Amino acid sequence: MTVPPPPPSSAAPGPPAPDQAPAVGPYGPLGVGGPQPPLSGLAVASLVLSLLVCLAPLGLVLGIVALVRIPGNGKRGKGLAVAGTAVGGAVVALTALLLVVGGARFDAWTEEGGGLLGSRDTKAGTLIHLKAGDCFAPAGGLFPPQGVEHERMTDTSVEIVPCDRPHPAQVYGTFRLKGDHAISDPAAVAAQASEGCVPLLHDFAPDTWALPAVEFSSYYPESVSGTGGDRTVRCWLGAEAGLPEASLRQDPGAWDAGQRAYVKAMRPSSEAWFSASAKVDTDLAAATAWAERMAEGGAESAKLLRAIGGLPARARGPVTALANRLDALSAIHRSASRAPTRAEFEKRWDINGDEDASGEEWEGRLALGLPVEDEEEDGGEQQG
Protein backbone atom coordinates (compact mmCIF):
# COMPACT_ATOMS: atom_id res chain seq x y z
CA MET A 1 0.00 0.00 0.00
CA THR A 2 1.25 3.38 -0.88
CA VAL A 3 1.40 5.99 1.99
CA PRO A 4 -0.17 9.26 0.90
CA PRO A 5 1.90 12.47 1.24
CA PRO A 6 1.24 14.69 4.24
CA PRO A 7 -1.26 17.48 3.92
CA PRO A 8 -0.02 20.98 3.23
CA SER A 9 -0.72 22.03 6.81
CA SER A 10 1.83 19.44 8.00
CA ALA A 11 4.75 21.03 6.11
CA ALA A 12 8.31 20.57 7.40
CA PRO A 13 9.03 22.51 10.61
CA GLY A 14 10.40 26.00 10.17
CA PRO A 15 10.85 29.04 12.29
CA PRO A 16 7.93 29.54 14.64
CA ALA A 17 5.37 32.14 13.88
CA PRO A 18 5.73 35.42 15.64
CA ASP A 19 2.79 34.72 17.95
CA GLN A 20 4.44 31.45 19.01
CA ALA A 21 7.94 32.83 19.91
CA PRO A 22 9.10 31.90 23.44
CA ALA A 23 8.88 34.62 26.13
CA VAL A 24 12.13 36.46 26.60
CA GLY A 25 13.23 38.11 29.81
CA PRO A 26 15.75 40.91 30.22
CA TYR A 27 18.62 38.41 30.50
CA GLY A 28 17.48 35.83 27.86
CA PRO A 29 14.59 33.41 27.31
CA LEU A 30 12.73 32.59 30.52
CA GLY A 31 12.93 29.04 31.74
CA VAL A 32 16.11 28.23 29.90
CA GLY A 33 18.65 28.76 32.83
CA GLY A 34 19.78 32.40 32.18
CA PRO A 35 21.96 34.29 34.85
CA GLN A 36 20.27 35.76 38.02
CA PRO A 37 20.35 39.56 38.67
CA PRO A 38 22.97 40.61 41.29
CA LEU A 39 21.98 41.14 44.95
CA SER A 40 21.91 44.71 46.23
CA GLY A 41 24.81 45.30 48.62
CA LEU A 42 22.94 48.22 50.20
CA ALA A 43 20.01 45.96 51.07
CA VAL A 44 22.29 43.41 52.75
CA ALA A 45 24.19 46.09 54.67
CA SER A 46 20.92 47.66 55.79
CA LEU A 47 19.69 44.47 57.45
CA VAL A 48 23.05 43.64 59.05
CA LEU A 49 23.60 47.11 60.48
CA SER A 50 20.04 47.39 61.74
CA LEU A 51 20.61 44.28 63.87
CA LEU A 52 23.56 46.05 65.54
CA VAL A 53 21.84 48.42 67.97
CA CYS A 54 24.51 51.10 67.93
CA LEU A 55 24.51 51.15 64.07
CA ALA A 56 20.75 50.84 63.59
CA PRO A 57 20.34 54.48 62.39
CA LEU A 58 22.85 53.78 59.58
CA GLY A 59 20.99 50.56 58.70
CA LEU A 60 17.74 52.52 58.46
CA VAL A 61 19.29 55.05 56.06
CA LEU A 62 20.88 52.37 53.85
CA GLY A 63 17.57 50.48 53.68
CA ILE A 64 15.75 53.55 52.42
CA VAL A 65 18.47 54.20 49.80
CA ALA A 66 18.30 50.57 48.63
CA LEU A 67 14.51 50.73 48.21
CA VAL A 68 14.88 53.85 46.05
CA ARG A 69 17.63 52.39 43.82
CA ILE A 70 16.51 48.77 43.29
CA PRO A 71 13.67 49.53 40.82
CA GLY A 72 16.08 51.40 38.59
CA ASN A 73 19.04 49.03 38.64
CA GLY A 74 17.11 45.72 38.50
CA LYS A 75 19.03 44.23 41.41
CA ARG A 76 17.56 41.74 43.87
CA GLY A 77 17.12 42.33 47.61
CA LYS A 78 14.01 44.42 47.95
CA GLY A 79 12.82 42.17 50.79
CA LEU A 80 16.13 42.57 52.62
CA ALA A 81 15.92 46.35 52.23
CA VAL A 82 12.37 46.39 53.60
CA ALA A 83 13.45 44.26 56.58
CA GLY A 84 16.50 46.42 57.25
CA THR A 85 14.43 49.59 57.12
CA ALA A 86 11.80 48.16 59.45
CA VAL A 87 14.28 46.81 62.01
CA GLY A 88 16.43 49.94 61.95
CA GLY A 89 13.41 52.18 62.38
CA ALA A 90 12.12 50.09 65.29
CA VAL A 91 15.49 50.17 67.08
CA VAL A 92 15.86 53.93 66.60
CA ALA A 93 12.34 54.56 67.89
CA LEU A 94 12.85 52.31 70.93
CA THR A 95 16.18 53.96 71.79
CA ALA A 96 14.60 57.42 71.63
CA LEU A 97 11.80 56.26 73.93
CA LEU A 98 14.25 54.84 76.46
CA LEU A 99 16.25 58.09 76.47
CA VAL A 100 13.14 60.13 77.16
CA VAL A 101 11.93 57.83 79.93
CA GLY A 102 15.41 57.50 81.44
CA GLY A 103 15.92 61.27 81.47
CA ALA A 104 12.61 61.78 83.22
CA ARG A 105 13.48 59.17 85.83
CA PHE A 106 16.93 60.78 86.41
CA ASP A 107 15.30 64.17 86.97
CA ALA A 108 12.91 62.62 89.44
CA TRP A 109 15.80 60.84 91.22
CA THR A 110 17.75 64.04 91.68
CA GLU A 111 14.69 66.01 92.76
CA GLU A 112 13.86 63.39 95.37
CA GLY A 113 17.39 63.43 96.75
CA GLY A 114 18.87 60.35 95.13
CA GLY A 115 22.45 61.60 95.61
CA LEU A 116 24.55 61.45 98.77
CA LEU A 117 23.43 64.94 99.73
CA GLY A 118 20.00 64.99 98.09
CA SER A 119 20.81 67.98 95.85
CA ARG A 120 20.55 68.52 92.11
CA ASP A 121 23.63 70.75 92.32
CA THR A 122 26.00 67.92 93.21
CA LYS A 123 28.59 66.61 90.77
CA ALA A 124 29.98 63.09 90.99
CA GLY A 125 33.75 62.73 91.11
CA THR A 126 36.62 61.24 93.07
CA LEU A 127 39.11 62.58 95.58
CA ILE A 128 41.65 63.21 92.81
CA HIS A 129 39.22 65.65 91.15
CA LEU A 130 39.12 67.93 94.20
CA LYS A 131 40.83 71.32 94.22
CA ALA A 132 41.31 74.00 96.86
CA GLY A 133 38.02 75.50 97.99
CA ASP A 134 35.84 72.54 96.88
CA CYS A 135 33.14 71.42 99.29
CA PHE A 136 32.30 67.74 99.10
CA ALA A 137 30.79 64.63 100.64
CA PRO A 138 32.76 61.37 100.52
CA ALA A 139 31.09 58.04 99.87
CA GLY A 140 33.06 56.56 102.79
CA GLY A 141 34.07 58.16 106.07
CA LEU A 142 36.07 61.36 106.33
CA PHE A 143 38.58 60.18 108.89
CA PRO A 144 40.34 56.91 109.79
CA PRO A 145 39.12 55.03 112.87
CA GLN A 146 40.41 56.37 116.17
CA GLY A 147 43.81 55.01 117.07
CA VAL A 148 44.51 53.81 113.51
CA GLU A 149 47.37 55.50 111.66
CA HIS A 150 47.80 55.71 107.88
CA GLU A 151 44.39 54.15 107.20
CA ARG A 152 43.74 54.30 103.48
CA MET A 153 40.38 55.40 102.12
CA THR A 154 39.16 52.44 100.11
CA ASP A 155 36.31 54.34 98.43
CA THR A 156 37.49 57.56 96.77
CA SER A 157 34.07 58.48 95.34
CA VAL A 158 32.77 61.93 96.30
CA GLU A 159 30.01 64.35 95.44
CA ILE A 160 31.26 67.90 94.87
CA VAL A 161 28.65 70.40 96.02
CA PRO A 162 28.25 74.17 96.24
CA CYS A 163 29.59 75.43 99.56
CA ASP A 164 26.29 77.16 100.35
CA ARG A 165 24.70 73.69 100.64
CA PRO A 166 25.16 71.32 103.60
CA HIS A 167 28.51 69.57 103.23
CA PRO A 168 30.73 67.45 105.49
CA ALA A 169 34.12 68.67 104.22
CA GLN A 170 36.02 71.36 102.34
CA VAL A 171 39.44 71.23 100.68
CA TYR A 172 41.65 74.05 101.91
CA GLY A 173 44.73 73.34 99.82
CA THR A 174 46.71 70.95 97.63
CA PHE A 175 50.44 70.46 97.06
CA ARG A 176 52.85 67.95 95.54
CA LEU A 177 55.10 65.72 97.61
CA LYS A 178 58.67 66.98 97.61
CA GLY A 179 61.52 65.45 95.68
CA ASP A 180 61.78 63.26 92.60
CA HIS A 181 62.91 60.16 94.49
CA ALA A 182 60.73 57.15 95.19
CA ILE A 183 58.74 57.14 98.43
CA SER A 184 57.41 53.75 99.47
CA ASP A 185 57.00 54.25 103.23
CA PRO A 186 53.40 55.32 104.05
CA ALA A 187 54.60 56.90 107.30
CA ALA A 188 57.07 59.11 105.41
CA VAL A 189 54.36 60.18 102.96
CA ALA A 190 51.97 60.91 105.84
CA ALA A 191 54.62 63.03 107.57
CA GLN A 192 55.15 65.10 104.42
CA ALA A 193 51.38 65.47 104.02
CA SER A 194 50.96 66.71 107.58
CA GLU A 195 53.86 69.15 107.28
CA GLY A 196 52.69 70.55 103.95
CA CYS A 197 49.05 70.98 104.92
CA VAL A 198 49.66 73.24 107.95
CA PRO A 199 50.76 76.41 106.10
CA LEU A 200 48.01 75.89 103.52
CA LEU A 201 45.44 75.89 106.31
CA HIS A 202 46.72 79.27 107.52
CA ASP A 203 46.62 80.66 103.98
CA PHE A 204 43.01 79.52 103.64
CA ALA A 205 41.85 80.51 107.15
CA PRO A 206 44.50 82.72 108.81
CA ASP A 207 42.45 83.14 111.99
CA THR A 208 42.25 79.48 113.03
CA TRP A 209 40.73 80.49 116.38
CA ALA A 210 37.55 81.49 114.54
CA LEU A 211 37.09 78.12 112.80
CA PRO A 212 34.20 75.93 114.01
CA ALA A 213 34.85 72.57 115.65
CA VAL A 214 36.43 70.61 112.80
CA GLU A 215 38.99 67.91 112.24
CA PHE A 216 41.83 68.02 109.76
CA SER A 217 42.71 65.30 107.30
CA SER A 218 44.29 64.72 103.91
CA TYR A 219 44.41 62.29 101.03
CA TYR A 220 47.76 61.40 99.55
CA PRO A 221 49.39 58.64 97.45
CA GLU A 222 50.32 55.60 99.52
CA SER A 223 53.64 55.50 97.71
CA VAL A 224 55.17 57.20 94.69
CA SER A 225 57.79 56.07 92.20
CA GLY A 226 60.93 57.91 91.28
CA THR A 227 59.73 58.33 87.70
CA GLY A 228 56.52 60.21 88.36
CA GLY A 229 52.95 59.29 89.23
CA ASP A 230 50.45 61.19 91.28
CA ARG A 231 52.22 63.16 94.02
CA THR A 232 49.37 65.48 94.91
CA VAL A 233 48.25 65.79 98.53
CA ARG A 234 44.75 67.15 99.15
CA CYS A 235 44.18 68.74 102.54
CA TRP A 236 40.71 69.21 103.96
CA LEU A 237 38.83 70.03 107.12
CA GLY A 238 35.51 68.52 108.02
CA ALA A 239 33.11 67.29 110.64
CA GLU A 240 30.94 64.21 110.69
CA ALA A 241 27.97 66.40 111.68
CA GLY A 242 28.58 68.71 108.70
CA LEU A 243 30.09 72.13 108.26
CA PRO A 244 28.15 75.40 108.19
CA GLU A 245 26.38 76.06 104.88
CA ALA A 246 29.13 78.41 103.74
CA SER A 247 32.77 78.26 102.73
CA LEU A 248 35.25 78.44 105.62
CA ARG A 249 37.71 80.46 103.53
CA GLN A 250 38.48 83.71 105.34
CA ASP A 251 38.94 87.15 103.79
CA PRO A 252 41.57 89.25 105.60
CA GLY A 253 40.21 92.25 103.72
CA ALA A 254 37.23 92.18 106.09
CA TRP A 255 39.48 92.93 109.09
CA ASP A 256 40.87 96.29 110.16
CA ALA A 257 44.63 96.97 110.28
CA GLY A 258 45.00 96.03 113.95
CA GLN A 259 43.13 92.75 113.51
CA ARG A 260 45.18 91.78 110.45
CA ALA A 261 48.44 92.55 112.26
CA TYR A 262 47.35 90.49 115.27
CA VAL A 263 46.35 87.45 113.20
CA LYS A 264 49.60 87.65 111.22
CA ALA A 265 51.63 87.85 114.43
CA MET A 266 49.92 84.77 115.89
CA ARG A 267 50.54 82.63 112.81
CA PRO A 268 53.95 81.18 113.87
CA SER A 269 52.52 80.02 117.19
CA SER A 270 49.40 78.61 115.54
CA GLU A 271 51.35 76.78 112.83
CA ALA A 272 53.56 75.19 115.47
CA TRP A 273 50.49 74.02 117.38
CA PHE A 274 48.88 72.42 114.32
CA SER A 275 52.14 70.69 113.34
CA ALA A 276 51.71 68.06 116.07
CA SER A 277 51.60 64.51 114.70
CA ALA A 278 49.61 61.57 116.03
CA LYS A 279 52.81 60.22 117.59
CA VAL A 280 53.24 63.13 120.00
CA ASP A 281 51.33 61.29 122.73
CA THR A 282 53.40 58.12 122.50
CA ASP A 283 56.77 58.80 120.87
CA LEU A 284 59.39 60.83 122.77
CA ALA A 285 61.24 61.94 119.65
CA ALA A 286 58.03 63.22 118.05
CA ALA A 287 57.04 64.98 121.28
CA THR A 288 60.38 66.73 121.79
CA ALA A 289 60.51 67.82 118.13
CA TRP A 290 57.03 69.33 118.46
CA ALA A 291 58.01 71.07 121.72
CA GLU A 292 60.95 72.68 119.91
CA ARG A 293 58.64 73.96 117.17
CA MET A 294 56.26 75.30 119.81
CA ALA A 295 59.15 77.11 121.54
CA GLU A 296 60.28 78.74 118.30
CA GLY A 297 56.76 79.60 117.12
CA GLY A 298 55.76 81.10 120.47
CA ALA A 299 58.88 83.26 120.67
CA GLU A 300 58.39 84.51 117.11
CA SER A 301 54.73 85.38 117.73
CA ALA A 302 55.65 87.24 120.93
CA LYS A 303 58.19 89.30 118.99
CA LEU A 304 55.68 90.14 116.24
CA LEU A 305 52.95 91.09 118.74
CA ARG A 306 55.25 93.61 120.44
CA ALA A 307 56.10 95.11 117.05
CA ILE A 308 52.47 95.93 116.14
CA GLY A 309 51.95 99.67 115.97
CA GLY A 310 48.76 101.71 116.07
CA LEU A 311 46.73 99.37 118.27
CA PRO A 312 43.73 100.92 120.00
CA ALA A 313 44.44 101.82 123.63
CA ARG A 314 42.10 99.14 125.00
CA ALA A 315 44.05 96.42 123.17
CA ARG A 316 47.62 97.36 124.09
CA GLY A 317 47.59 95.87 127.58
CA PRO A 318 45.99 92.53 126.62
CA VAL A 319 48.26 92.12 123.57
CA THR A 320 51.37 92.83 125.67
CA ALA A 321 50.17 90.34 128.29
CA LEU A 322 49.73 87.72 125.57
CA ALA A 323 53.27 88.36 124.27
CA ASN A 324 54.67 87.94 127.78
CA ARG A 325 52.75 84.70 128.24
CA LEU A 326 54.03 83.33 124.90
CA ASP A 327 57.61 84.07 125.94
CA ALA A 328 57.10 82.21 129.22
CA LEU A 329 55.58 79.26 127.42
CA SER A 330 58.43 79.27 124.91
CA ALA A 331 60.90 78.71 127.72
CA ILE A 332 58.78 75.83 129.08
CA HIS A 333 58.49 74.20 125.67
CA ARG A 334 62.22 74.53 125.00
CA SER A 335 62.98 72.82 128.28
CA ALA A 336 60.54 70.01 127.44
CA SER A 337 62.19 69.57 124.02
CA ARG A 338 65.37 68.51 125.83
CA ALA A 339 63.74 65.98 128.14
CA PRO A 340 65.60 62.62 128.23
CA THR A 341 62.52 60.52 129.06
CA ARG A 342 58.79 60.57 128.49
CA ALA A 343 58.08 61.06 132.16
CA GLU A 344 60.47 63.98 132.30
CA PHE A 345 58.88 65.48 129.19
CA GLU A 346 55.44 65.40 130.82
CA LYS A 347 56.85 66.98 133.97
CA ARG A 348 58.57 69.83 132.13
CA TRP A 349 55.70 70.47 129.72
CA ASP A 350 52.90 70.81 132.24
CA ILE A 351 54.30 73.33 134.70
CA ASN A 352 51.61 74.38 137.22
CA GLY A 353 49.01 72.69 135.00
CA ASP A 354 48.79 75.80 132.82
CA GLU A 355 50.44 75.00 129.50
CA ASP A 356 48.69 77.38 127.08
CA ALA A 357 47.91 81.04 126.57
CA SER A 358 44.19 80.72 125.94
CA GLY A 359 43.21 83.16 128.68
CA GLU A 360 45.49 85.93 127.45
CA GLU A 361 44.54 85.23 123.85
CA TRP A 362 40.85 85.48 124.72
CA GLU A 363 41.40 88.91 126.31
CA GLY A 364 43.49 90.15 123.38
CA ARG A 365 40.95 89.06 120.78
CA LEU A 366 38.08 90.58 122.72
CA ALA A 367 39.90 93.92 122.93
CA LEU A 368 40.57 93.86 119.17
CA GLY A 369 36.98 92.99 118.24
CA LEU A 370 37.78 89.50 116.94
CA PRO A 371 35.29 86.68 117.61
CA VAL A 372 35.81 84.73 120.84
CA GLU A 373 34.05 81.82 122.48
CA ASP A 374 31.29 82.93 124.84
CA GLU A 375 31.54 80.57 127.81
CA GLU A 376 28.29 81.89 129.23
CA GLU A 377 26.44 80.73 126.13
CA ASP A 378 27.61 77.12 126.03
CA GLY A 379 30.64 77.60 123.84
CA GLY A 380 28.99 79.91 121.32
CA GLU A 381 30.87 82.81 119.78
CA GLN A 382 30.55 86.49 120.43
CA GLN A 383 32.02 89.46 118.64
CA GLY A 384 34.16 91.74 120.76
Image: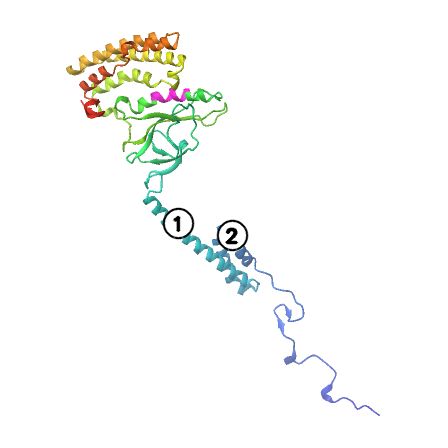
Label 1: how many Cα within 10 Å (few below 14, some 14–19, many 20+): few
What x and y, as percent, mark residue 138? 37, 33
Quarter-of-image position of residue 27: bottom right
Rendering colour mode:
rainbow
Between residue 329 and residue 102, name the one nearer to us.
Answer: 329
Q: Amino acid at mark 2?
A: Leu
Residue 52's disc is 2
Residue 66 visible at all = no
Residue toward you, 86 or 167? 167
| x then y, percent, for residue 337 | 36, 9
Tell me which label, 1 or 2, sits earlier in the chain: 2
Q: What kind of residue is marked 1?
A: Gly
Magenta residues, as a range? 191-199
Q: How many numbered marks have been drawn onto this rendered protein structure?
A: 2
**Residue 30 among magenta residues:** no
Element type where label 2 sits in the image: loop
- In the picture, the disc for residue 357 is none
Residue 334 is left or right of residue 14, and the answer is left
Discs 1/2, front: 1
Tell me the chief SS of the magenta region.
helix
- Say whether residue 16 is left or right of residue 202: right
Describe residue 7's horizontal placement relative to residue 201 as left or right. Answer: right
Residue at left offset 39%, top offset 49%: 102
User: Marks 1 and 2, how far apart in space?
Assistant: 21 Å
